Image (spheres, rainbow, N blue to C red):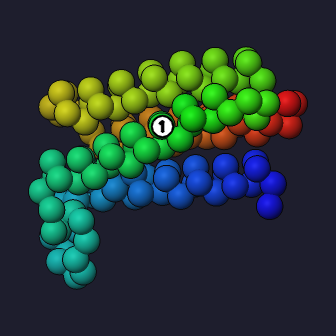
Amino acid sequence: LSPLSAVLFVLFFLWQIPHFSLLLLTHAEDYRKQGIFKNLATSLPEQGIKRITAVWLLSLGTCLLFLTVIPGFLPMTARVIITAATILFLGTVFFILFCRAGVSSRNVFIFLNTYFFFSLVVIATGAMGA
């Protein structure tokens, strides 16, 4: 198991919970109407799901920032890009989740997945060049 494989495994593990939590928030009303099965959208209030999502996003961001301090894993350019993108991402997401009313979970979902894909590309290309 290469270090890059282990890093990608951890990142995908940390990404999947907020990914699906945001899907639940986006379609919460549909889940409540159907009432077929219980999930977070039918069991917790919206604020509770947002808190869970925030914890997982913080974990993902912390993991990505940790990658920037591992000597020799990424070149300096990739470190700077990931650090700046992670700080911008976390600040924006926490602002949207907790301060802005009326912002759709779908927009946060798209933002999360764009950031995650961007980070994976930077890590993959950086690790291959390091």
Q: Is residue 120 left or right of residue 112?
A: right
In the image, taking residue 91 as reference, residue 37 lies left or right, namely left
28 above or below 83? below
Q: Residue extending furthest right?
A: 129
In which quadrant will I find the N terminus?
bottom right
Q: Against 82, is 77 above or below?
A: above
Give the residue at x 20% y 33%: 98
Image quadrant in which you'd find residue 69: top right
Query: How dense is the environment of label 1, judged by Cα within 10 Å: few (below 14), some, or many (20 and up)?
Result: some
Q: Nearer the viewer, residue 87 or 63?
A: 63
Looking at this rendering, what residue extends furthest in the front direction?
Answer: 71
Screen quadrant of the C terminus? top right
Q: Residue at x 36, y 24 (%)?
A: 91
Residue 27 position, x and y percent, is: 28, 58
Mark 1 residue element:
helix
Residue for point 76% across, 48% down = 4
Q: Quadrant of residue 119?
A: top right
In the image shown, does 21 or 1 lie closer to the viewer? 1
Q: Please report the residue visible at 63 percent of the width from the left and 20 percent of the height from the top.
A: 81
The answer to whether residue 110 shows anywhere in this view is no
Would you name the residue on which mark 1 appears?
62
Residue 54 vertical position relative to residue 33 in the rendered view, above or below: above
Of 19 and 84, nearer the camera is 84
